[in-house]
Every structure is written in C-alpha cells, then in structure tokens.
C-alpha cells in the first residue's frame, strides 16, 4: 500500500489532514476502492450467514442459530461491522480526493506565477 502520512492540524475546518505524495495518491485511491469491493463481497457472504438454515435438531440447530446471530441482527454483528468499515473507507477516499484536489489547486496557483523563457 502506498505511504500516506497523517498529521494533526488545528485549523478551523479540519481536525486532521493528509499529506500525500501526488504520484501515490491515485494508486492509494484505487486500492481503497478495491478494498471496498472486497468488503462489499464480505457483507454479502455475512448476510447469507444471517439466514438460519435448518440443520436438524440438537447441536446442529445450535450451530444454525449461532450462524444467524453472527451474520446479522445483533449489535456488533459481522454485517454491521463490515458496513461501518465500508463507510470509513468511503470517508478516507473522500479525504484523499480532497487532499489531491488541494495539491492540484496549489500546484496550479504556483505554476501561474512562474514564467519560463528560453528553450
């Protein structure tokens, strides 16, 4: 995974900001998107666990109930945790996109003040 340095900043609008090497930012964004896809697939699998499968009586029934409780329905379930993680990834991607845009804007402004002559 590309290196992303985080640092605290005490400005009016943001509690924390990212310092990102511009050549790595696009790659980091793409990898976060890939991770989101994996998390989405894991949510689908966990939802399947949330269906109680009639496995028979006795111990098998207990296993079926445990699988259903683990998958969905209870606070702290796999689905709930994975969905929350997916939201965190989306927030991280938004922060990264903001950092890339700030870099691009400041780079463009700096380039406006540079005049080159000669060949």
Image (cartoon, rainbow, N blue to C red):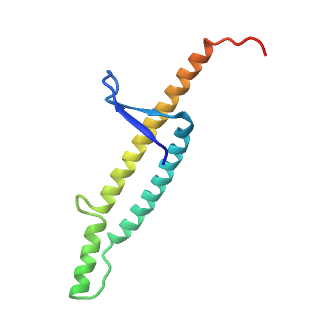
Residue depicted at x 33% and y 26%: 9
Image quadrant in which you'd find residue 114 = top right
Instruction: Name the spot of residue 56 as percent of width and height, x first.
Output: 27, 88
Q: Quadrant of the C terminus?
A: top right
Query: Seen in the image, is 58 located left or right of residue 29?
Result: left
Q: Is residue 59 above or below residue 31?
A: below
Residue furthest to the bottom in view is: 57
Question: Relative to the observer, which residue lies in front, 64 or 81?
Answer: 81
Please tell me in which quadrant of the rendered image residue 50 appears: bottom left
- Give the camera-side residue of 70 and 9: 9
Q: How many marks?
A: 0
Residue drawn at x 50%, y 53% is: 34
Q: Where is residue 6 drawn, in percent x and y?
A: 38, 35
Residue 86 in percent (x, y) is at: 39, 51
- On screen, residue 58 versus residue 89, left or right, reads left
Q: Where is residue 55 shown, x and y percent of the image?
A: 30, 85
Which residue appears farthest toward the front when viewing the image? 119
Q: In the picture shown, does residue 14 fall above or below 27?
A: above
Left or right: residue 110 compared with residue 84: right
């Amino acid at each position: 995974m590309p290196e992303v340095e985080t640092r605290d900043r005490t400005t009016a609008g943001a509690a924390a900001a990212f310092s990102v090497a511009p050549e790595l930012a696009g790659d980091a964004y793409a990898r976060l998107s890939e991770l989101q896809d994996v998390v989405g697939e894991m949510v689908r699998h966990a939802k399947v666990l949330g269906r109680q499968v009639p496995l028979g009586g006795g111990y098998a029934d207990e296993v079926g109930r445990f699988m259903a409780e683990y998958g969905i329905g209870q606070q702290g379930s796999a689905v709930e945790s994975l969905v929350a993680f997916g939201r965190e990834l989306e927030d991280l991607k938004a922060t990264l996109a903001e950092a890339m845009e700030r870099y691009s804007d400041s780079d463009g402004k700096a380039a406006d003040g540079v005049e080159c002559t000669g060949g």
